[in-house]
Image (tube, rainbow, N blue to C red):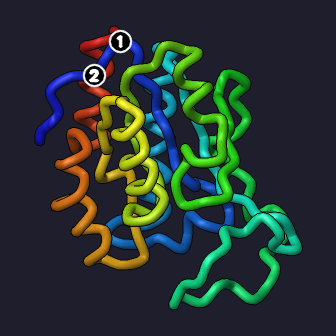
Amino acid sequence: MALTALDERTALVIIDMQNGVVGAATTPHTGGEVLARAVALAEAFRAHDAPVVLVRVSLAADGADAVPGRTEASRPAATPPPGWDAIVDELAGHPGDITVTKRNWGAFHGTDLDLHLRRRGITQIVLAGVATSIGVESTARAAHEHGYHVTLAVDAMADRDADAHRNSVERIFPRLGETGSTAEVIALLEKTLG
């Protein structure tokens, strides 16, 4: 579904734009392209005093808070380098932003994201970040289940796998909300809040 509207109480939620993740998701957009678009979205939301939520994934050094369960995908054996879970400098450092730390794929389960949004009367979220088929899709599904209107800035996200990205954008996201480009989201934000 094409973009039709943004609610007056809309927040931007950016997933996993952090030092150890941005470079890993490179299709169909590079990490740099995704970052530039995420920064443009954040600047537009901040200019209208609309909430910007920066979500990062982090785990204890000993792995004690890793999600349990058996999977066929291997888990990283090495301890991540220091600072891997810090929000990238281009997005960090804005005192009005909300930072949420997650331990799962999605940004809702086990975090205070919903509480932050509800306290501000938010009815809609715009999503961007990496990886499209994991963190972004998981968060979009949960946002839909929590009753938020969901908008996905599909050129401000990327994945390690082109087919996974395409599946999310073409098959999953239209069932959860509306999709559009960064420029379309910003234009609609200007129209709604400008």
- Tell me: 80 left or right of 109: right
- Tell me: 153 left or right of 86: left
Q: How many marks?
A: 2
- Tell me: 194 left or right of 130: left
Find residue 149 and report its image quarter.
top left
The reply to whether residue 65 is in sight is yes
Q: In the rendered image of this protein, does residue 155 appear above or below residue 74?
A: above
Q: In the rendered image of this protein, does residue 152 appear above or below residue 194?
A: below
Q: Residue at x 48, y 13 (%)?
A: 121
Residues at discs 2 and 1 in contact (Cβ within 8 Å): yes
**Residue 111 position within the rendered picture, expressed as x and y whole percent measured from the top left:** 65, 42
Q: In the rendered image of this protein, does residue 87 appear above or below residue 78?
A: above
Say the numbered circle drawn on residue 6.
2
**What is the secondary structure assignment of the residue under circle 1?**
loop
Q: Residue at x 25, y 25 (%)?
A: 187
Report the quarter where the N terminus lies.
top left
Residue at image mark 1: 8
Q: Nearer the viewer, residue 110 or 169?
A: 110
For mark 2, does the 10 Å Cα neighbourhood hold few (<14), some (14 to 19), or many (20 or more) residues?
A: many
Q: Give the residue type at disc 1.
A: Glu
Q: Residue at x 51, y 44 (%)?
A: 14
**Residue 165 position within the rendered picture, expressed as x and y whole percent measured from the top left:** 30, 68
Q: Residue at x 69, y 84 (%)?
A: 76
